[in-house]
């Protein structure tokens, strides 16, 4: 899962409120991109993937209310690329990224964010946690 790994590294290395918000926004976008490739799946993971996609969109949208989110034209998100692997492997990779997003956003909310930025971080972290909870049990 090279695209998700690159995105996870980007989120992990983000420091400072605007950079964390930008990386988290990109993380939610990457999740949406990867899950979107499995929309036509007929397996038992379709429902959890669709629910996770909804949470990813909600998390991304929550960050749009953060005043410190850099303007979109300045963002340089790593390309999520086309992920290959079993649905279980993709689910696990997305769950890991969402856990990282939740931790990074919660930490940033507690240490660097105020007002609307803090609310946006907490809301986005809540959605990231829901993604993790939906997909964490998937096997590779």
Image (spheres, rainbow, N blue to C red):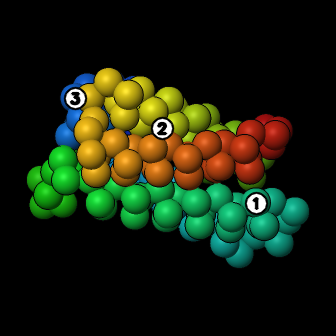
Query: What residue would you read off at disc 2?
Result: 101
Query: What residue would you read off at disc 1?
Result: 48
What residue is rendered at 27% in x and 46% in y? 115
Instruction: Please give left or right for residue 9 compared with residue 71 in the image.
Output: right
- The numbered mark, 3 or 2, whose residue comes first in the sequence reads 3
Circle on res. 16: 3
**Separation of residues labelled 1 and 2 (CA atoms):** 18 Å
Q: Position of residue 85 (x, y in %)?
A: 68, 47
Instruction: Please give left or right for residue 62 compared with residue 117 in the image.
Output: right
Instruction: Please give left or right for residue 27 compared with residue 52 in the image.
Output: left
Which secondary structure lies at badge 3?
Answer: loop
**Separation of residues labelled 3 and 2 (CA atoms):** 14 Å
Q: Position of residue 101 (x, y in %)?
A: 48, 38
Instruction: Please give left or right for residue 70 compared with residue 25 in the image.
Output: left
Residue closest to the eye, 49 or 112: 112
- Residue situated furthest bottom in the rendering: 40
Q: In which quarter of the image is residue 65?
A: bottom left
């Amino acid at each position: 899962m090279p695209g998700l790994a690159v995105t996870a590294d980007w989120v992990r290395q983000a420091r400072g409120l605007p950079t964390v918000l930008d990386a988290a926004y990109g993380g939610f976008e990457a999740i949406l991109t990867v899950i979107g490739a499995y929309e036509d799946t007929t397996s038992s993971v379709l429902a959890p993937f669709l629910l996770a996609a909804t949470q990813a969109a909600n998390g991304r949208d929550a960050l749009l209310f953060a005043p410190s989110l850099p303007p979109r034209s300045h963002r340089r998100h790593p390309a999520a690329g086309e992920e290959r692997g079993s649905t279980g492997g993709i689910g696990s990779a997305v769950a890991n990224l969402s856990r990282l997003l939740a931790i990074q956003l919660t930490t940033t909310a507690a240490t660097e964010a105020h007002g609307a930025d803090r609310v946006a971080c907490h809301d986005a972290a809540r959605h990231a946690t829901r993604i993790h909870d939906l997909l964490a049990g998937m096997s590779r």
